[in-house]
Image (cartoon, rainbow, N blue to C red):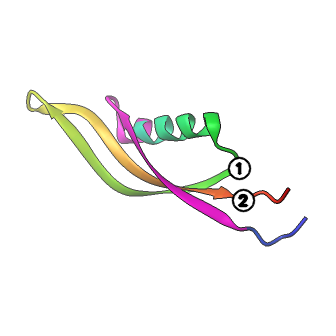
Amino acid sequence: MSENHTYKKIEVVGSSSVSIEDAIKNALAECNKTLHHLEWFEMVDTRGHIVNGEVGHYQVTLKIGMRIQAE
């Protein structure tokens, strides 16, 4: 096994009516259902949805790094 790794990055948007942290957790949990070797993430954007003058949903854009696994 090599100590050098290669990664692929994907971009996803997570949302939550509770918090930014919850939006991150929701995005990672959904990605973890179908993607493998998730290694890291970076939050590149934060925004929200307004409903009746209040926060309806928090939205975060994440870049997720997945390690490419040699077969």
| Labels 2, 1: front one | 2
* Count of numbered circles in the view: 2
Res 1 quadrant in image = bottom right
Q: Is residue 3 left or right of residue 18?
A: right
Q: Amino acid at mark 2?
A: Ile
Q: Is residue 1 left or right of residue 43?
A: right
Could you say where residue 30 lies in the image, as x and y percent from the top left? 54, 34
Disc 2 and disc 1 in contact, CB within 8 angstroms: yes
Could you say whether the residue bearing mark 1 is in a helix, strand or loop?
loop
Camera-side residue: 69 or 47? 69
- Say whether disc 2 or disc 1 marks the residue closer to the N-terminus: 1
Q: Is residue 14 left or right of residue 70?
A: left
Q: Residue at x 21, y 37 (%)?
A: 49
Camera-side residue: 71 or 30? 71
Q: Badge 2: how crowded within 10 Å, few (<14), some, or many (20+)?
A: few
- Furthest residue toward left: 53
* Magenta residues (range): 6-22
Q: Residue at x 32, y 42 (%)?
A: 59
Could you say whether the residue bearing mark 2 is in a helix, strand or loop?
loop
- Furthest residue toward right: 1
Q: Residue at x 45, y 42 (%)?
A: 24
- Residue behind mark 2: 68
| Quarter of the C terminus within the rendering | bottom right
- Residue behind mark 1: 37
Q: Amino acid at mark 1?
A: His
Q: Residue at x 8, y 32 (%)?
A: 53
Label 2 – label 1 distance at C-alpha? 7 Å
Q: Badge 1: how crowded within 10 Å, few (<14), some, or many (20+)?
A: few
Measured along the vertical axis of the image, is residue 68 above or below residue 46?
Answer: below
